[in-house]
């Protein structure tokens, strides 16, 4: 908000803004579907740092 509005926001101002605009935001949980687990890493010609 500091970059877009060009001023420093207090916590109270941010909380009021957040409550006013809550219906316009979506959570990441609702947009992300089930994911597959990652595969094991493959190191080719490299040693692991210990």
Image (tube, helix red, strand yellow):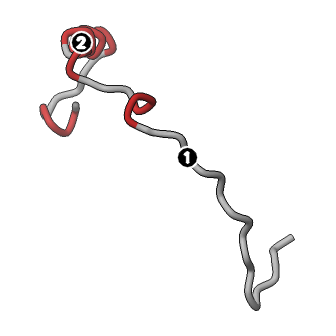
Residue 8 position in % (x across, y down): 23, 26
Counting the numbered discs, the total is 2
Tag 2 and tag 1, C-beta contact below 8 Å: no
> Image quarter for residue 30?
top left
Q: Is residue 39 left or right of residue 21?
A: right
Q: Tag 1's secondary structure?
A: loop
Q: Which image quadrant is residue 15 in?
A: top left
Nearest to viewer (mark 2 / mark 1): 1
Q: Tell which circle, 2 or 1, labels the residue nearer the N-terminal end.
A: 2
Position above or below: 5 against 9 = below
Crowding near the residue tagged with mark 2, few <14, some 14–19, many ≥20 C-alpha atoms within 10 Å: few
For the point 72% across and 70% down, which residue is it?
A: 41
Where residue 22 sits in the image (x, y, percent)? 26, 15
At which x and y percent is residue 25? 26, 24
What is the residue that sits farthest to the right in this orientation?
50
The quadrant of the image that shows the N terminus is top left
User: What's the CA distance linking mark 2 and mark 1?
Assistant: 37 Å
What residue sits right under mark 1 in the picture?
35
Q: Which mark is residue 11?
A: none
- The C terminus sits in image quarter: bottom right
For the residue labelled by badge 2, is the local secondary structure a helix, a strand or a loop? helix
Residue at (19, 39) in percent of width and height? 3
Name which quarter of the figure residue 31 lies in.
top left
**Residue receiving disc 2:** 13
Viewer-proximal residue among 34 and 45:
34
When the figure is inspected, residue 47 is found, relative to residue 30, above or below; the finding is below
| Residue 9 located left or right of residue 32 | left
In the rendered structure, the answer to whether residue 2 lies left or right of residue 42 reads left
Instruction: Pick out the residue farthest to the bottom.
Output: 45
Q: Which residue corresponds to the image point at 29% horizontal and 8% vertical from the top-left?
A: 12
Percent coordinates x, y for residue 7 in the rendering: 16, 29
């Amino acid at each position: 908000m500091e970059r877009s509005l060009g001023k420093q926001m207090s916590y109270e101002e941010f909380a009021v803004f957040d409550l006013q605009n809550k219906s316009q935001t979506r959570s990441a949980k609702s947009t992300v579907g089930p994911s597959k687990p990652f595969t094991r890493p493959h190191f080719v010609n490299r040693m692991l740092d210990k």
